[in-house]
Image (cartoon, rainbow, N blue to C red):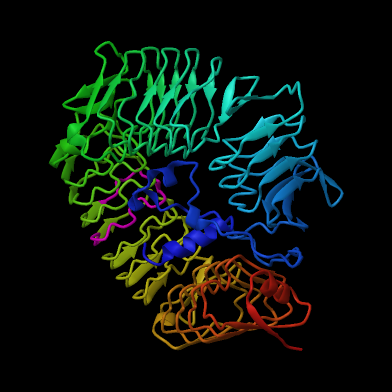
Amino acid sequence: MRKIDKLLALLISSALILPAAGCGAGNISDAGGSLETPVSSVSGPAEDSGTEKAAVPTEDSTDWDEEVNPKCGDYEYVKNEDGNLTIVRYTGSDSEIRIPSELDGMKVTAIGSEAFAYCGSVRKLSLSEGIKEIGDQAFLGCSFLESVELPGTLADLGANPFIRCFKISEFVFPSGSDYLEFDGDVLIAKKDRRLITYPGKASVSEYSVPEGTKIIGKGAFTDCTVLTEITLPEGLEKIEDNAFERCMGLIRIGLPSSLKSIGEYAFSYCNSLALAELPEGLESIGDHAFHNCPSLLVINIPATVSRIGDNPFTFWDDCKSKNISVSEDNPYFEMSDGVLYGREDRRLIYCPPAKAIDGFAVKEGTEILGGYAFDQCSSLTSVSIPGSVRVIGKGAFCDCSSLEDIVLPETVTEIGDFAFVGCASIKEIKIPDGVTEIGDQTFAQCASLVSITVPDSVTLISTEAFLSCSSLTELTIPDSVISIGDRAFGFCESLRMVVIGPAVSKMGANPFACCRALNDIRISPSNGAFEIRDGALIDKAGQTFIFSAAAYDTAEYKIPDGVRMIGPYAFCESEKLKTVIIPSSVSRVGEAAFYLCTSLTELDIPGSVIRIDAGAFSECSALGKAVVPDSVAYIGEGAFAWCNDDLTLSVAPGSYAEGYCKDHQIKYEKIS
């Protein structure tokens, strides 16, 4: 998705909830719940001048609000329902950290997910007594961490809090702990005999999990790339989600006969894994359990397996050499002409790309095309779907880049997120009557899509549903639609005309971001929620500026009077825009509002503005000067990231903006 990827990485790192790129970006694990946080999306801790993030008043209640957390010293926190605190972010750079038992006079009882992620300075870590919970990946990527002292009060650890902490040599906790034990190389929860984390050693290529272990916990061996062979003990019953994710050197793993369950993404990105024999007695295989395991040549699904999630074998290369079979005694699943089906739910689970050359006919009687069933079938040109099909699952035709001919039968009532993302050859599609929602990125990156018929049954068009459908020129949104999600039609660069029906009452972050040709937006006269004012699309209730195509063709643009908020992505990539006149009615500049306005040179923010959200002026590469008034009480992460190296902010002495400049090493000058 071009330059927008860089911004999305920034916004993710600043804790904004944004959709993942989905399978169109070639990484199902991002879309489907992987533990992975991309290294490139997390910046190191910035120098802190002690400026507190003030409570920011807002005039509008929107889904775009990002949490503004209180801060005490190097710790940002949230207050829990019981009055105690959870630390959600550490901003310091100490080599030895003792996490306190109290902040601002309140007890600290929990460490939040990824709160200390990529804290590269810490060598020794100590948690005070009273802390009861550590969240998922709390210390992710603390690559120099050597010693961890845990309190006796600890009662709950989330998904491996110590992923990529390869230098840990000791865990210290009170003797006689009821919750934990350190068994040689691994941390184990006593109650359920769950292996929580294996920090890994650079010199160890083979490892035997301790006897008595019942569960391999979520992410326990994630990124242990040196391991080539792992032996699991008899008595082990469960391998949880992402347990061996990205163990790229792993060639062989022995699965014991006691094993009952393999979780989602359990062996994803185990590129070298060549042998993993599924034992009799296994009952469940989770979504994408063997995602991107190109060396795994043989899989036999035993008779005891009664549950298989979304396609366990997504993103396999050279599938002609794969041998997938199902025991003849299995009553729940079968292979039919080389395709994996579920008998009970009548679901097509997995169609190998080698079976989907040119045309493919789904077996009669099939009711569900499962999640990612045709993933990466790049040679598939047409598919025949029988009238028995009711559901097209999440990512079902993900990246079927040659698919041109598909007719959805009228029996289909549900189309999942990402269902046709990356189907770049589809020119026309009719959504059946009865479908009520078009999900996240359902038709994203369908670059050849010229015509789509949306029926009157649809009430919701979700986030990025038609993102980057660059050939789409016109669209009538039916009268039944109530809500349009974030960037639903973003980057549809040929879109010239949109008709918005009377029922639309909610729009997410600029549904028409970067639709440069969209000069004709027609709103039903009976729509009471939105209006066109001076050529701009305005949310009446919040007086939010959403979009104007005129901003893409002019050097100077004046935002209409009365606007209170400049919405997210409102002027995204308005590359000709040199000057923007912001009226004194504006109190908030939304997330990425002026992202990549590369000709914007100067900026005068009026004294009415109290909040500037994350990425608001990021990559405004010509921006050399901006006046930020002392009315501003909050500036989001990366608000001025990747601007001109000589950017200077004019700020009032002692203002929030001055503190922000100090914290983020931005040049500034004081003005009275």
**Could you tell me what secondary structure mostly forms the magenta stretch?**
loop
Residue at image location 56% in from the left, 15% down from the top:
212
Q: Is residue 16 above or below residue 353?
A: below
Q: Residue 483 placed where, x, y %? A: 48, 56
Q: Which residues are magenta?
A: 430-450
Determine which quarter of the picture holds residue 180: top right
- Is-magenta flag for residue 261? no
| Count of numbered circles in the view | 0
Say if 519 sits above or below 282 in the image.
below
Taking the spot 28% from the left edge, 68% from the top edge, the residue there is 473
Residue farthest right in this picture:
105
In the image, residue 446 lies in the stretch drawn in magenta = yes
| Frontmost residue, 542 versus 162 | 162
Query: Which residue occupies 34% across, 43% down?
Result: 395
Q: Quadrant of residue 445?
A: bottom left
Place residue 278 in its image quadrant.
Answer: top left
* In the image, farthest residue toward the top: 329
Question: Is residue 70 in view from this perspective?
Answer: yes
Which quarter shows the N terminus?
bottom left
Q: Is residue 262 above or below residue 644?
A: above
Q: Position of residue 518 (x, y in %)?
A: 36, 74
| Place of residue 40 in the rendered image (x, y in percent of width and height, measured from the top left) | 48, 57
Q: Is residue 539 left or right of residue 330?
A: right
In this orientation, which residue lies closer to the viewer: 36 or 473?
36
Quadrant occupied by the C terminus? bottom right
| Residue 508 visible, this angle | no
Q: Residue furthest front?
A: 203
